[in-house]
Image (tube, rainbow, N blue to C red):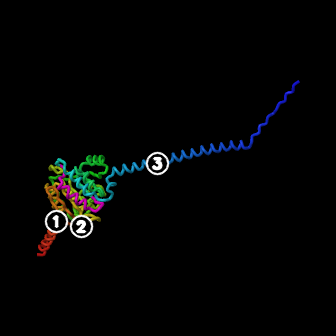
Amino acid sequence: MKNTNNNTKLILLHPYIQKQGSSNRLWLLAFISFFTIAFLVTLIYTRESTSTASSSTASFMASSASPVSVFGNAPLPATVINTLLYYASKSNDTYHMPYSDLKPISDVLRKCSSPCNFLIFGLTHETLLWKALNHNGRTVFIDENRYYAAYMEEKHPEIDAYDVQYTTKRSELKELVASVKEQVRNECRPVQNLLFSECKLGLNDLPNHVYEVDWDVILVDGPRGDWPDAPGRMSPIFTAGVLARSKKGGNPKTHVFVHDFSGKVEKTCGNEFLCKDNLVEEGENLAHYVLERMDESSSHYCKNQSSTSSLSAAAAAVSSSS
């Protein structure tokens, strides 16, 4: 009979083996943690770099699209001004201003202290030119055609244009000038806020802020006046004279230009409301006046009108005493 003994084997793991397994797990955990942190850092850095690059690109595109960022607040270089005038005057269109008319206006804008406030009656072929030449200042356009004013603002968002409804007719020139003379001490005073005026030649429906700005340069190049029922430029010339004399601050002098000065309306109203004494230059198509701020109590537009009024008053006093 053979006895079979069941031998039980006991396997003992040396402590060194257990420690080695734990060490391997720790190294594996550390390895995974390291690469996880590295991945997160790389991801964050990539996003920040992309965001910075996008911002830089956007800033560059914005600066490239804006002419102001190129020159800052400095005046336009003479070469740029001369180039703009050269190409603006080379058009064969008869409605474009010739160089001889563009240059005097450009010279005044160039010498104007920054920022220069420039008011233009009429949206013309030179609209973008005036905006460019006065790039540091405020340029506002007033036109009779509301649809064209809206079109220009939509096509050129940098343009600040408003429409106005004229109630005058060129054929009424004589009567309108006479009505101003009759009301020179009341509604048609040379110094007043036209927003509240009922003078027939005063424009009282412009945007409110137009009356509050101290305009340095005013150009009258509209509205139309080619036929008897056309509105003519009586109201803009009269309004320009009142705005110039009613300034509250800024430069006490205002440059007023009247285009198409060979016309009867332009010459008559220029002499009556801007005055020959203030005429500093007259070309074939352009008149340049320089008006000074006046006292609120003033009741005459021109110096010779003041002298005439004084003589008339003296004569009346002599007659009454005798």
- Of tags 1 and 2, which is closer to the observer? 1
The residues bearing labels 3 and 1 have C-alpha atoms spaced at a distance of 66 Å
Provide the residue designation for mark 2: 294
Question: Where residue 285 sits: x, y (%)?
Answer: 15, 55
- Residue, disc 1: 277
Q: Which quadrant holds residue 7?
A: top right
Q: Is residue 2 above or below residue 126?
A: above
Name the residue beneath numbered marker 3.
49
In the image, 38 versus 243, the foreground residue is 38
From which residue to which does the magenta span run?
95-117
Q: Please, is residue 42 above or below residue 253 in the view?
A: above
Q: Quadrant of the C terminus?
A: bottom left
Name the N-terminal-most of marks 1 and 2. Answer: 1
CA separation in Å, label 3 and label 2 = 61 Å
* Image coordinates for residue 170, horizontal then vertical, percent: 16, 53
- Do the residues bearing badges 3 and 2 touch, measured as CB atoms within 8 Å? no
- Nearer the observer: mark 3 or 1; the answer is 3
* Number of numbered tags placed on the structure image: 3
The three-letter code of the residue at mark 1 reads Asp
Amino acid beneath label 3: Ser
Answer with mark 3 or mark 2, whichever residue precedes in sequence. 3
Pick the front one: 21 or 278: 21
The residue lying toward the viewer, choosing from 174 and 218, is 218
Residue at the image position 20 percent from the left and 57 percent from the top: 103
Is residue 98 on the magenta stretch? yes
Residue contact between numbered discs 1 and 2, judged by CB atoms under 8 Å = no
Look at discs 3 and 2 and give the one toward the viewer. Answer: 3
Q: What secondary structure is marked by label 2? A: loop
